[in-house]
Amino acid sequence: MERERLELQGAAMTRLFHDRLFFAPLSKNHPPQYILDIGTGTGDWAIHMGDVFPTSQVIGTDLSPIQPDIVPPNVNFYIEDSSEPWFYSHSFDYIHTRVTTGSWANFKTQVADQAYEALSPGGWFESQEFDCLLTSDDGTLRPDSAMSRWMHDMLNAAQVSDRPFMMAAHVKQAYLEAGFVDVHERVFKMPINPWPKDERLKELGRMWHRNMTQGLSGFSVWLFNRVYDRSPEETEVMLVDVRREMSDMYIHAYMPIHVVWGRKPYPHEIVVRNEANPGQAT
């Protein structure tokens, strides 16, 4: 069940990105030799990358062994805690994270810094992440709503647990501080139900609604019990109103999804770090 939800989540994100798996300027004419997917989850993204780049070696790592057994010959999965120091026998040309918010105490030191060290000069690092953050542009998501209260409780509980859910909006800055250059960011809006008029976004809203409502208990019950000492029954009662609001198409809420990518500079490049040109290489 959870695997199916994660597959749905990944498919929705890829569709939101207009079927792009990556935004870094990778080329089939000069494919990356080694690709690393941190927190690979179901492994779907890594498998697709193995198909797109059949001459590349793709490695996916995760704490949970939920990846399929039958995979392309150039794709391998390993059980690994990537919050700990990384040890690889070779460097990588492209490193990727997707939906790892809540996995790190400090994204900059545990991920961005390590990705910088693990990349070959000129290699690319890319993150496709979202926070536990819902918002609306027209004020239909009220600050006193059940969804807003749930979101506040989730963010606070994650912070107390030293696994903050507010990471995606700070990823670009982490890249710059780690030393990456040519850093870019795009922010996409994922609707939480089929409220948009645009048919493509409406279908994405249906997919994300299933993703959110199916995962709501899993996101909340254990964390609220650990931090607030709430019983599972108390949390489930609270989630009734949250699910109702998530299904209300008069609430035009969406989840911002941040895509950030940057390049490790070559040794001859000088990284200029100032307010005018942060992360510019000359």
Image (cartoon, rainbow, N blue to C red):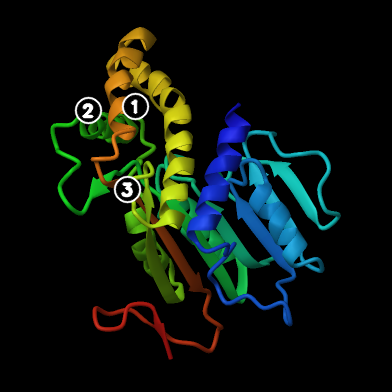
Question: What residue sits 27% from the left and 31% below the top?
Answer: 245
Q: CA distance from mark 3 to mark 1?
A: 14 Å
Q: x, y (%) of residue 40?
A: 62, 46
Residue under numbered circle 2: 146
Task: Work out which quarter of the rendered image holds the C terminus and state it.
Answer: bottom left
Q: Secondary structure at mark 1?
A: helix
Left or right relative to 177: residue 148: left
Question: What residue sits 36% from the left and 46% below the top?
Answer: 131
Which amino acid type corresponds to the residue marked 1 in the rendered image?
Answer: Arg
Q: Is residue 237 visible?
A: yes
> Toward the viewer: 188 or 156?
188
Which amino acid type corresponds to the residue marked 3 in the rendered image?
Answer: Tyr
Q: Is residue 83 visible?
A: no
Residue under numbered circle 1: 243
**The quadrant where residue 184 appears:** bottom left
Determine crowd level at label 2: few under 14, some 14-19, many 20+ residues with C-alpha closer than 10 A. many
Q: x, y (%) of residue 102?
A: 42, 40
> Toward the viewer: 71 or 262?
71
From this view, report whether residue 53 is shown above or below residue 151. Answer: below
Residue under numbered circle 3: 254
Q: x, y (%) of residue 48?
A: 70, 56
> Toward the viewer: 50 or 18?
18
Q: CA distance from mark 1 to mark 2?
A: 9 Å
